[in-house]
Amino acid sequence: MNNLTLTPAATVLLIRDNNDGIEVLMVKRSKRPPFGNLYVFPGGKIDESDKAEKFSDFCIGINDEEASKKLGIRSGGLSYWIACIRECFEEVGILLATKENGQELDLNGSEKQKFDNYRKMLLNNEINLFDICQKEGLILNLTNIEPFSHWITPEIEIKRFDTRFFIAYLPAKQKEEHDGNELTQSVWINPKKAIEKAFNGEMPMIMPTIRNLQECSEYDSGIELLKERSKFTSEDIPAILPKFFKKEGQWVGLLPDDPDYDNY
């Protein structure tokens, strides 16, 4: 496998608790490739603006050394957390940050218009997340963001990603609003219901999405899930590289825990 063809990426499963138990925010991509019309989670590739060094004074909860250790890499781990926050804000308008004094952002009320404008500027590349932090005295809250899984795009694909999936708890005074461009729908849904809809064709999904939902469905509470995952190390989250091959004219997919995986 040529690692030079892999693009680092971060995806975030936003979770919350309500009467239906744990819920996950799912979004539907537009028709554009590579994930056209699929239900996924907010996320994207790591940008140059996500580089960890300059954010060190604007983060609480974890530093680059600790983040890198959690991911099992030498350095730059914090960039994945930063990318999660940026993508989350760009795509669904949720900003995982607080003010310097610890006060929560109120993106449902008095601060909505101002941060809606920042979001538009961010999407138009007129500003970056670091600039927003400086202008508004924001601290990125990494306390409620934890690594969840690690998937590598199969070798049969032209565009390949090395994607770290994270979970993050929804802040109290914020709600989602998909961008209407890359994303055409957004929905909070219980993981078990989402899996049912995936298998009956109502919500088209790819394998990593379904597997992540299955992991979430083992928990009754988002708080419980986040607390449990905070104990995980890089060894608890191995990279998953699906393998695909043709057998008797049909495509067959294998995961690392399948018996025949090492034979292909």
Image: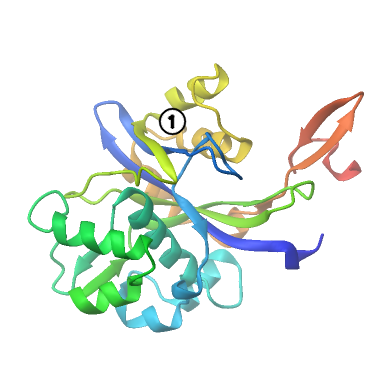
Query: Which of the 4 image quadrants contains residue 106?
Result: bottom left
Of 139 and 149, the residue lying toward us:
139
Q: Position of residue 23 (x, y in %)?
A: 35, 34
Numbered disc 1: secondary structure: helix
Which class describes the residues within 10 Å of circle 1: few (<14), some (14-19), or many (20+)? many
Q: Position of residue 57 (x, y in %)?
A: 32, 82
Q: In the drawing, does residue 126 fall left or right of residue 31?
A: left
Query: Which of the 4 image quadrants contains residue 206?
Result: top right
Which quadrant does the N terminus fall into?
Answer: bottom right
**Residue displayed at 69% across by 50% down:** 153
**Residue displayed at 40% across by 83% down:** 54
What number of labels is visible? 1
Q: Position of residue 6 (x, y in %)?
A: 69, 61
Q: Is residue 71 visible?
A: yes
Residue ranking furthest to the left: 110
Q: State the scheme by which the image is colored.
A: rainbow
Q: In the drawing, does residue 78 fall left or right of residue 199?
A: left
Q: Is residue 106 visible?
A: no
Which quadrant does the C terminus fall into?
Answer: top right
Q: Amino acid at mark 1?
A: Pro
Of 255 and 162, the residue lying toward us:
162
**Residue displayed at 52% across by 71% down:** 77
**Residue displayed at 56% across by 33% down:** 210
Q: Position of residue 172 (x, y in %)?
A: 19, 49
From the image, tell me which residue sits under label 1: 191
Residue ranking furthest to the top: 200
Q: In the drawing, does residue 264 fall left or right of residue 17?
A: right
Is residue 8 positioned above or below 183 on the image? below
Is residue 30 positioned above or below 192 on the image? below
